[in-house]
C-alpha cells in the first residue's frame, strides 16, 4: 500500500504540473510569440529561485560547504561541456533568440530535479502517510511555476508545442522512477540525494544565466527592461514564498 501511495503521489505531482503548463497550448501562436520574452523572464526567476532558494539550501543541510561548492562547480562544467556537444544550428529563423541546446540542458536538469523530488516523496511516505501527502502537495506547488516557465523555454528554443509538451511529460516521469528507487534502495541512495540536488541546481543556474539572460539583452526599451526585471523578481518571489511556507 505504501508503494502505491508513493507512486500515486509522485505521478500526481508531475501530471498536474504538466497539465497546468500545457494550458499555454490554448494561446494563439501570434499572441504566444509576443508573450514568450515575458514568459522567459518569469522562467529565469523561477529557475534562479529554485536553484538558490530551494535545491542548494536543502543540499547544504547534508553537505559541507566545500563539498557543495565542488559539486556545484562540477555540475556547471558538465553542463558547459554538454552545451558544447549539443549545440547544433537547427533554427528556422535567421537569428535564434536562445541556443537550441538550452532545451536539452533544461530537460536534463529538470529530469534530475524531478528524480530527487520522487526520492523525497518516497522518504516522506515511509515516515508517515500524512507527511507523504503534504510533501507531494508541496512538490506540486513548487513544480507548477517551473513547468510553466520551462514549457515557454522549450517553445522559445524553437520546439513545436507538441514536442514541448512531450518533453515536459518525459521529464516529469523521472519523479516516478526516483520514487520507486527511493522506496527500494532508500538506505543506499540516501547519501546521493544532496549531490543530485546540487547537480540539478547547476543545470538550472547554467540555463538561466548562460542562455536565458543573454538572450534578453538589448531587445527592449527601458520600460520593457524594467517590466522584465519585475517578472524575474516575481518568479524568484513565488518560489521563495513556497520555500518559506514549507
Image (spheres, rainbow, N blue to C red):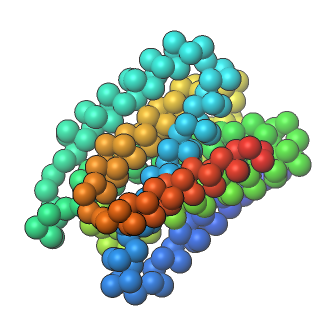
Residue at image coords 51%, 64%: 148
Question: Residue at (35%, 77%) from the top-left corner?
Answer: 34
Residue 224 x %, y %: 38, 66
Relative horizontal placement of residue 174, taking residue 191 as reference (left or right): left
Query: In terms of depth relative to the viewer, which is nearer, 244 or 91?
Result: 244
Residue 240 in view, yes or no:
yes
Residue 212 horizontal side relative to residue 91, left or right: right
The outermost residue toward the front is 222
Question: Which residue is the extreme one toward the left?
Answer: 94
Q: Quadrant of residue 202?
A: top left
Residue 226 rendering spot, x and y as whole percentages? 43, 60
Above or below for 143 versus 116: below
Q: Quadrant of residue 92?
A: bottom left
Find residue 128 and report its horizontal and vertical position in percent.
Answer: 88, 41
Q: Is residue 150 visible?
A: no
Q: Residue at x 59, y 71 (%)?
A: 20
Up the image or down, 13 lies above or below 109; here it is: below
Amino acid at each position: 500500500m505504501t508503494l502505491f501511495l508513493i507512486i500515486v503521489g509522485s505521478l500526481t505531482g508531475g501530471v498536474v504540473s504538466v497539465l497546468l503548463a500545457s494550458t499555454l497550448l490554448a494561446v494563439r501562436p501570434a499572441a504566444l510569440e509576443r508573450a514568450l520574452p515575458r514568459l522567459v523572464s518569469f522562467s529565469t526567476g523561477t529557475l534562479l529561485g529554485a536553484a538558490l532558494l530551494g535545491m542548494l539550501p536543502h543540499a547544504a543541510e547534508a553537505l559541507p560547504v566545500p563539498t557543495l561548492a565542488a559539486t556545484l562547480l562540477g555540475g556547471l562544467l558538465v553542463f558547459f561541456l554538454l552545451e558544447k556537444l549539443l549545440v547544433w544550428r537547427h533554427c528556422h529563423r535567421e537569428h535564434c533568440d536562445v541556443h537550441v541546446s538550452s532545451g536539452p540542458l533544461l530537460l536534463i536538469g529538470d529530469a534530475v530535479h524531478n528524480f530527487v523530488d520522487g526520492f523525497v516523496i518516497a522518504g516522506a511516505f515511509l515516515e508517515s502517510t500524512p507527511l507523504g501527502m503534504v510533501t507531494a502537495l508541496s512538490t506540486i506547488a513548487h513544480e507548477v511555476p517551473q513547468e510553466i516557465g520551462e514549457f515557454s523555454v522549450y517553445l522559445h528554443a524553437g520546439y513545436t508545442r507538441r514536442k514541448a509538451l512531450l518533453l515536459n511529460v518525459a521529464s516529469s516521469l523521472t519523479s516516478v522512477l526516483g520514487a520507486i528507487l527511493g522506496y527500494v534502495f532508500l538506505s543506499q541512495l540516501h547519501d546521493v540525494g544532496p549531490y543530485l540536488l546540487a547537480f540539478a541546481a547547476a543545470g538550472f543556474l547554467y540555463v538561466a544565466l548562460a542562455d536565458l539572460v543573454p538572450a534578453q539583452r538589448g531587445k527592449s526599451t527601458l520600460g520593457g527592461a524594467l517590466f522584465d526585471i519585475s517578472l524575474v523578481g516575481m518568479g524568484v518571489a513565488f518560489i521563495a514564498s513556497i520555500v518559506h511556507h514549507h
